[in-house]
Amino acid sequence: MRIALVDSGIGLLAAAAALRRLRPDASLVIANDPAGMPWGPRSPQDITERALRCARAAARTSPDALIVACNTASVHALDALRAELEPGIPVVGTVPAVKPAAEGGGPIAVWATPATTGSAYQRELIRDFAGGARTTEVPCHGLADAVERGDPAAVALAVKAAATLTPPDVRDVVLGCTHYELVAERIRAELAASGDTNPVRLHGSAEAVAQQALRRAGIEPAPDAAPGPDPLFLVEGRPAPPPAALV
């Protein structure tokens, strides 16, 4: 059993951790593009070409499914990846978890890369799944890059800037980039400091993406697989798999 994951950098670690929890016996194939990271500021054509190169390299290992563990690549390249690889290899994308975030009625915010923020795909997702909840799209300039570099100071600055753009009454925040799930506690703390006293709920996608990949591959989770952790958390710089969300 083999599952491949594609991303520009380490954002795929959250989905990889979820897969490892669901099927400890699965072999994971990692295909990323550190020289081109981050993909967020790049053009849709460039993102698609880079994602295709990564996916083709992973496809040579004959995986049972391939996860596009990047929200930006899923927005801009998922159709191209599916057209080339399916039906031979099921391709699972990662999209912002708008639907579960909006279940409380809003208001909500969607934190995403500049390339995803304002895209037609994200606007359609909000229109179709936000249920009319007031939704603020928040571009997180430099955050994915700061996470990739492991630069706490840059992460703090980028998170603070995004929090400033987030209305203080927002209680549900969609983490629309897989890199953001790796610094969820930093995001939660900053939102708590800048908002009111009610806790902020963060909505990631790694757990649901992992479950969908197994379903598409016809693989059952291990009988003793533990429930996914809740809430998102980060311990001493080491990411843990986040809770379920829309795929």
Image: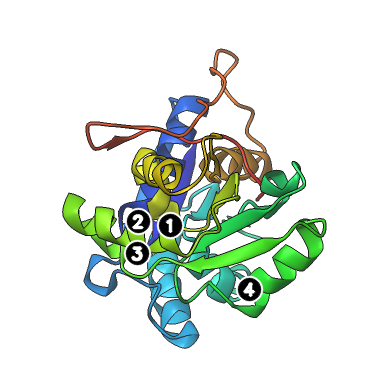
Q: Nearer the viewer, mark 3 or mark 1?
A: 1
Q: Quadrant of residue 42?
A: bottom left
Q: Which residue is mark 4?
A: 79
First along the sequence among labels 1 and 4 = 4
Where's residue 81, x and y in %? 56, 70
Crowding at mark 1 (Cα within 10 Å: few <14, some 14-19, many 20+): many
First along the sequence among labels 3 and 1 = 3
Q: What element does badge 1 sit on?
A: helix
On screen, residue 29 versus residue 98, left or right, reads: left
Q: What element does badge 2 sit on?
A: helix
Specify the color scheme: rainbow
Q: Nearer the viewer, mark 4 or mark 2?
A: 2
Name the disc covering residue 159, or none.
2
First along the sequence among labels 4 and 2 = 4
Q: Which residue is mark 1?
A: 163
Amino acid tagged 4: Asp
Query: Given contact means CB atoms under 8 Å apart, are the residues at marks 2 and 1 in contact?
Result: yes
First along the sequence among labels 2 and 3 = 3
Label 2 – label 1 distance at C-alpha: 6 Å
Q: Nearer the viewer, mark 1 or mark 4?
A: 1
